[in-house]
Image: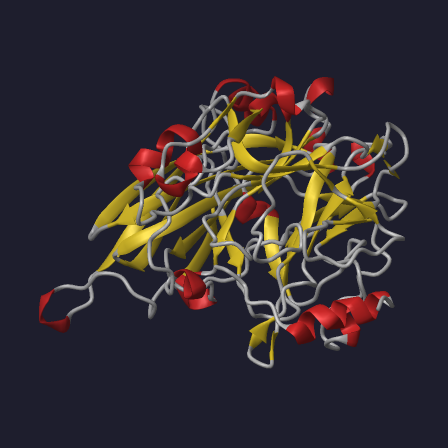
């Protein structure tokens, strides 16, 4: 949606600126993925005639294939089935409360049955976290595998239903997206979205130079639109060769100006100022390392600017460079990519609605991607949108299941990547299964620049 700008909000920003190891040493944390055992009950689902609500059972079978099946066998899960996997079943479209969610663990055959479910559509996610002792059983080349993960959408009908989920091994990776804060209070009737930010984290054991690495937002094709359907957008939204994007930025620097040490985080702020002066519940971003810059922006000269490498300004009415979820949310993928030259990327005008005459989109090759985050709005907010999300937002080679975490107008709640464990020196190792729904969680307080 177009965000209204106010003189008060803009002047406030100007005022704030003062302007007229070894994996065997990881201490694995108890995962937060399992806790609720109450059944999805009051939020919706089908019912029988005469006012009788029909209940059903769902049997989930977790599969592993190819080299992942070989890895699972090293851990004692044979026959292409994954044992001891945490299975979370969430009633689709319902608030993420314990009443609408069930969590259980697969048995030795890789199966789990959950009963007393309302009929309806469910998001099924799977996570199998590896202990350091289990990782040590894998080949040397697989010592950075820290979990298996996957997800699907299952339709539950009485009396029984079945679903299969393919779980894929996830690796620690190097540079990962670690936090997305989309808080935005309403002040004097106007949304204040300028305190938002995205944080990246060095999840590896080696120094990373951010110079020239790419951040992008994929095409806004994840929802039905008045001008086109999900079927019509599928060739670009579900392209296995790469992610189509109209908005790409790169980190500044000439090669070795912006190092990021192992265990260190760096923030890319919408506006790098102390927003707590405007509202006491907002973060101080005046000392972050990077900020986005736009046509109606105040520039903090002590903070490096992200460099836009595509042609079109992101939401010109916003004028602030970039912010999560300010645009009409279509669950567009946010991603980090290795260094690339725009001239080397395939480009085209997507022939759908206004995109047909807009600036071109560029396809970022799948093999250049470092990390991907995909999230819809929370079910409460999604219910207010005029059209539904597409059944498949992105291919599972990019993200195996989207989260439901973005929500405008809240203040301090943030989406953070889950903590898998810590090394003896206290350095955090973050979870990376390749499924946003598994890897991220909503936390009550933002933490720009550090891992709590």
- Give left or right: position of 436 versus 26: left
Query: Which residue is depicted at the point 43% across and 34% down?
Result: 237
- Give left or right: position of 417 versus 225: right
Image quarter for residue 367? Answer: top right
Query: Which residue is depicted at the point 42% across and 67% down?
Result: 99
Image quarter for residue 42? Answer: bottom left
Q: Is residue 158 visible?
A: yes
Q: Considering the image in quadrants, where does the C terminus appear? A: bottom right
Count of labels in the image: 0
Whole-percent x, y for residue 126 in the image: 49, 42
Above or below, 148 against 330 in this view is above
Whole-percent x, y for residue 347 in the image: 52, 24
Query: Which residue is depicted at the point 42% across and 66% down?
Result: 380
Whole-percent x, y for residue 307 in the image: 74, 39
- Give left or right: position of 196 versus 119: right
| Residue extending farthest bottom | 188
Above or below, 156 against 368 in this view is below
| Residue extending farthest left | 50
Q: Is residue 398 visible?
A: no
Q: Nearer the viewer, residue 204 or 253?
A: 253
Whole-percent x, y for residue 341 in the image: 68, 22
Tell me which colouring the rendered structure shows: secondary structure
- Give left or right: position of 302 versus 230: right
């Amino acid at each position: 949606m177009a965000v209204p700008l106010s003189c008060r909000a803009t002047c406030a920003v100007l005022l704030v600126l003062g302007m007229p190891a070894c994996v065997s040493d990881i201490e694995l944390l108890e995962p937060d993925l399992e806790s609720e055992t109450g059944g999805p009950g009051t939020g919706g689902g089908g019912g029988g005639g005469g006012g009788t609500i029909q209940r059903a059972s769902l049997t989930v079978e977790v599969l592993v294939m190819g080299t992942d099946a070989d890895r699972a066998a090293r851990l004692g899960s044979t026959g292409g089935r994954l044992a001891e996997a945490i299975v979370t079943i969430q009633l689709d479209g319902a608030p993420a409360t314990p009443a609408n969610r069930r969590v259980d663990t697969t048995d030795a055959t890789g199966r789990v049955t959950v009963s007393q479910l309302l009929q309806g559509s469910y998001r099924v996610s799977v996570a199998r976290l590896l202990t350091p002792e289990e990782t040590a059983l894998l080949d040397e080349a697989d010592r950075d595998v820290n979990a298996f993960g996957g997800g699907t959408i299952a339709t539950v009908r009485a009396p029984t239903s079945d679903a299969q989920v393919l779980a894929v091994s996830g690796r620690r990776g190097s540079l990962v997206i670690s936090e997305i804060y989309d808080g935005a209070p309403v002040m004097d009737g106007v949304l204040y979205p300028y305190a938002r930010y995205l944080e990246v984290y060095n999840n590896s054991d080696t120094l990373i130079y951010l110079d020239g690495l790419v951040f992008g937002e994929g095409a806004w094709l994840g929802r039905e639109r008045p001008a086109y359907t999900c079927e019509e957008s599928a060739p670009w939204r579900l392209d296995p060769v790469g992610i189509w994007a109209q908005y790409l930025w790169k980190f500044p620097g000439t090669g070795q100006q912006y190092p990021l040490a192992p265990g260190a985080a760096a923030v890319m702020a919408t506006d790098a100022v102390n927003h707590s002066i405007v509202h006491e519940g907002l973060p101080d971003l005046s000392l972050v390392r990077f900020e986005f810059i736009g046509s109606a922006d105040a520039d903090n000269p002590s903070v490096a600017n992200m460099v836009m490498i595509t042609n079109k300004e992101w939401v010109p009415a916003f004028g602030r460079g970039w912010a999560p979820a300010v645009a009409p949310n279509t669950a567009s993928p946010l991603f980090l990519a290795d260094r690339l030259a725009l001239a080397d990327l395939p480009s085209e005008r997507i022939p759908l609605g206004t995109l047909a005459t807009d600036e071109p989109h560029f396809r970022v090759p799948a093999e250049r991607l470092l990390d991907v985050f995909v999230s819809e709005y929370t079910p409460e907010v999604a219910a207010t949108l005029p059209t539904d999300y597409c059944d498949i937002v992105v291919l599972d080679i990019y993200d195996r299941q989207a989260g439901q975490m973005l929500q405008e107008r809240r203040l301090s709640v943030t989406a953070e990547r889950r903590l898998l464990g810590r090394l003896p020196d206290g350095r955090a190792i973050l979870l990376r299964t390749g499924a946003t729904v598994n890897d991220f969680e909503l936390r009550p307080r933002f933490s720009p620049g550090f891992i709590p």
